[in-house]
Image: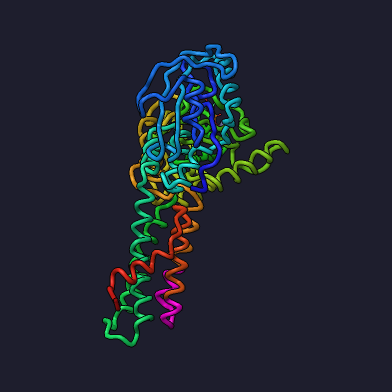
Amino acid sequence: MEHRQDTIFALASGGGRGAIAVVRLSGPGCGDVLRRVAGGLPQARQASLRRLRAPGSGEVLDQALVLWFPAPASYTGEDCAELHLHGGPAVIAAVSEALAVLGARPAEPGEFTRRAFLNNRMDLTAAEGIADLIAAETEAQRRQALRQADGALARLLEGWAARLMRLLAHQEAAIEFADDDLPSDLGDRARAGAAALKAEIATHLADGGQGERLREGVVVAILGAPNAGKSSLLNTLAGREAAIVSARAGTTRDVVEVRLVLAGVPVTLADTAGLRDAGDEIEQEGIRRARRRAGEADLVLAVFAANEAPDAATLEWAARGAVVVANKVDLALAPAGIAGVAPLAVSALTGEGLQALRERLEAEARRLAGAGDAAMLTRPRHRAALTEAAAWLAEAEAAPLPELVSEALRAALRALGRVTGRVGVEDVLDIVFGEFCIGK
Ligand code: GDP
Ligand code: ZN
């Protein structure tokens, strides 16, 4: 196979010092390397305790567990091996040197998974899922990454591609054998199928970007007039003093951010300078940044002091779907109401209502980012390719000539194939001649 090139190795366990360090190898030279360094090939896929020796001198470098995964049933599809060494940096360095002397080279980032893709062990979305799994910090992120690594997104896309291929086959047959006695509605069936598939892709595109949000985290901006208690709320939600609280208006001059996990979703809470006019230069810069941050935020928490009437900015954010919080209820008999929204009444001072606020934020996080348990689009490139596929399907539906329908279906199939990295438009011929059994 053309992708079988040289033999690569890398430290597969983390960079920090652990009791055990795992060095992984892949490539056609693996067997040779094991014979020379570990005194022979262990049983396939079984851990075996070996002395590792330096190639020239024969000096013992370490006692290690050695695993041998012959091709093709390995992670990369090539011959692979793992050396479970003692975790000291000198051990890792000595063994790495021995591997290099024997002709293996240090792997580049992602190279093992790249080889796995090139050898058809996984599609591109599964490879992305593995990258996400390694980066996952929260429970919902882990679930989403594992699902994608396990092929959930690939299966969804391959199901669509298979349907599209069949439509294309019908369409091609309708063109190729227009004069023969084939069912004459083949072309109509292709158009109807294109419309149905387009609608299905559209529902996935209309998911509100949950998959990307869960990968990247949700941003919540806390906005409100100076002294409403934004910094106090941020500190209580974060469980620590992250922002300066002061009785003097306009103290939070820059954006203070804290990271927390709500419902398994990583959330960045951004405390912003009070949205009021005037103030000195620095404060105005803070206000500009607050406005920008609020514009980029996935959710706005609009805070006002319950013992005062809500200010104009709060009313505006309320109308735009913000979560409205009436703070300092300990100072008010009843918080002022806002037409159409029920403010969450809380007190950062006494803790009243904070549990309800936290639960509301968890519900919002789930709504914005999902729980990680469906096949989601997790990257802009998925979305871009599906948008393109849907556009081509619309074109197929409306095309005035059978040849143009065919063209558009092919283009849609190519767009889908880009997501998984498998573009097999040629396969359509097999279907045409297999499914219809025309001629010989
Ligand atoms: P910010 O300017 O919106 O960030 O407001 P701060 O968090 O700095 O708070 C302004 C002042 O209000 C401080 O003196 C806080 O101690 C006080 N404060 C904040 N929350 C409450 C509350 O729920 N009740 C009362 N009584 N005072 C509060
Ligand atoms: Zn503040």
Which percent across, then down, holds residue 179? Answer: 33, 87
Q: Position of residue 147 (x, y in %)?
A: 36, 42
Q: Is residue 401 magenta?
A: yes
Residue 382 in picture, x, y percent from top left: 47, 53
- The relative height of residue 144 versus residue 434 in the rendered view (above or below) is above
At 59% from the left and 38% from the top, the residue drawn is: 274
Q: Is residue 189 left or right of residue 27?
A: left
Q: Nearer the viewer, residue 307 or 347?
A: 347
Task: Determine the quadrant in which ligand 2 lies.
Answer: top right
Q: How many marks?
A: 0
Q: Residue furthest right?
A: 281
Q: Quadrant of residue 405?
A: bottom left
Q: Quick check: is 319 in the magenta stretch?
A: no
Q: Which residue ends up furthest to the bottom in the rendered image?
A: 179
Visible residue check, residue 186:
yes
In this view, 22 is above or below 268: above
| Magenta highlight: main SS | helix
Can residue 344 be seen in this snapshot?
no
> From which residue to which does the magenta span run?
392-405
Q: How is the image coloured?
A: rainbow
Residue at the spot 43% in from the left edge and 16% down from the top edge: 50
Location of residue 109 in the rendering, given as x and y in whole percent from the top left corner: 56, 36
Q: Quadrant of residue 161?
A: bottom left
Is 8 rendered above or below residue 415?
above
Nearer to the camera, 393 or 80: 80
In the rendered structure, the answer to whether residue 6 lies left or right of residue 398 reads right
Which one is nearer the viewer's eye here, 65 or 195? 65
* Along the line of sight, the residue nearer the viewer: 286 or 184: 184
